[in-house]
Image: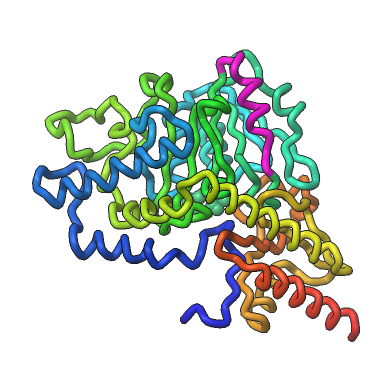
Amino acid sequence: MNGKNRIYLDHAATSWPKAESVLEAMSRFARECGAAAGRGGYHSAAAADLVVSSLRRSIAQRIGASNSDCISFHPSGTAALNAAIHGLVRPGDHVVVSAADHNSVLRPLNHLAQTQGVRLTIVPTDGSGLVDFQSLIASVAPDTRLVALTHASNVTGAVQPIAELGEFLRSHPAWFLCDAAQTFGTLPISVEDVGIDLLAAPGHKSSGGPLGTAFLYVASQLHRSFVPWMQGGTGSQSESLEMPTTMPLMLEAGNLNVPALAGWADSLQSWQSSEEVRRRMEHAARLSERLHAGLGQIEHLRVHGRAGILPIASVTIEDLAPSDAAAVLDAEFGIETRAGMHCAARIHAHLGTEQGGTLRISAGHTSAEFEIDAVIEALATILSAMHSS
Ligand SMILES: Cc1ncc(COP(=O)(O)O)c(C=O)c1O
């Protein structure tokens, strides 16, 4: 595993490689500081606090949130989404979600449907993974408490109409939860402009941070009706058996992973300016175009979805299971992709890929055009070998 001769095309799962400066920031924090945040008054504890509070401000600023107390940190996108859903949804509530959403949204909602009588409406997508917007808004009833829509499908890369949904929900009492796992770090987003009440994203995907990092934004007007989904030490009000009722402490029971947050903070610095954000977006869109154009030329291979801003493509191949295709790409060509359902239980019924899922190829900011060409050529070679014999 020395990174040589390895073409990594599984960025939708987690980005790799991480920048040297990210690894260095993590290592520096662990070696030179290493204190817990929010738990002491000595110098190194204050330094740990500073890492956390400045990262909170930096994320708030990037997502257009005026108050950094609205940002809490979590060990994964899944944990952040669970904090959002369990914090807000009550027994008997009605919730609307899309079939493009990830299991980190669908499973907690399904659990609440099974155990607390939550009424769930799952809105279909088209064959590219794009939600049916008319069905989505038609599903929102006067008593709907929450509408959850992923910013982009992790299976096909389809970017969902979140601005239109935000606009629609402005005149409706339902809260809007957006999962930006696949877009934070590639597409700009402004919660206040779009009208998003809850936004979650991991730090380890396109924002370039390490595993073990994620944030949840909870709009100020929701804080009083929120409940913490996990209880424990927060380093404050320790005499009380109750969790603090203020954000972000209410959602941050237990020690934060400060070394990882230090690495994430470093990675955010590399896309601070609007020019850099634009450059990343353009690079991603160019890779997407190249990937889809190349895959589209290969016979006996079907691409589910179309080129867009995110460099993700899901394919199925005649007479070759996605898992076998991924194994051959890895063993024979050193190309790492992912096969299966991609933790998205419902989208496959709309893509026609319920049997075995898809082979997903996903690039990132560090991916080069030659890597896209390599996977296209490898798939063409595999298919021509299968069909010449
Ligand atoms: C769309 C989407 N949402 C949520 C998640 C969960 O993030 P994490 O893996 O950090 O728990 C993922 C991870 O793949 C994802 O793709």
Left or right of 13, for residue 254: left
Please check the rendered image and state whether residue 169 is part of the magenta-colored stretch, yes or no. Answer: yes
- Can you tell which quarter of the image residue 371 is in? bottom right
Q: In the picture, which quadrant includes the C terminus?
A: bottom right
Vertically, is 26 above or below 185? Answer: below
Please check the rendered image and state whether residue 322 is part of the magenta-colored stretch, yes or no. Answer: no
Residue farthest bottom in this picture: 389
Residue 86 drawn at (x, y percent): 44, 33
Residue farthest left in this picture: 42
Specify the segment rendered in magenta.
Answer: 159-173
- Can you tell which quarter of the image residue 319 is in? bottom right
Q: Residue at image x 76%, y 26%?
A: 134
Q: In terms of depth relative to the viewer, which is nearer, 345 or 194? A: 194
Left or right of 148, for residue 160: right
Residue 355 drawn at (x, y percent): 75, 58
Q: Residue at image x 60%, y 74%?
A: 7
Residue 232 in sight from this viewpoint: yes
Residue 27 drawn at (x, y percent): 28, 65
Left or right of 344, for residue 216: left
Q: In terms of depth relative to the viewer, which is nearer, 28 or 303? A: 28
Q: Residue at image x 79%, y 79%?
A: 382
Residue 238 drawn at (x, y percent): 14, 34
Q: In terms of depth relative to the viewer, which is nearer, 48 or 108? A: 48
Vertically, is 18 above or below 174? Answer: below
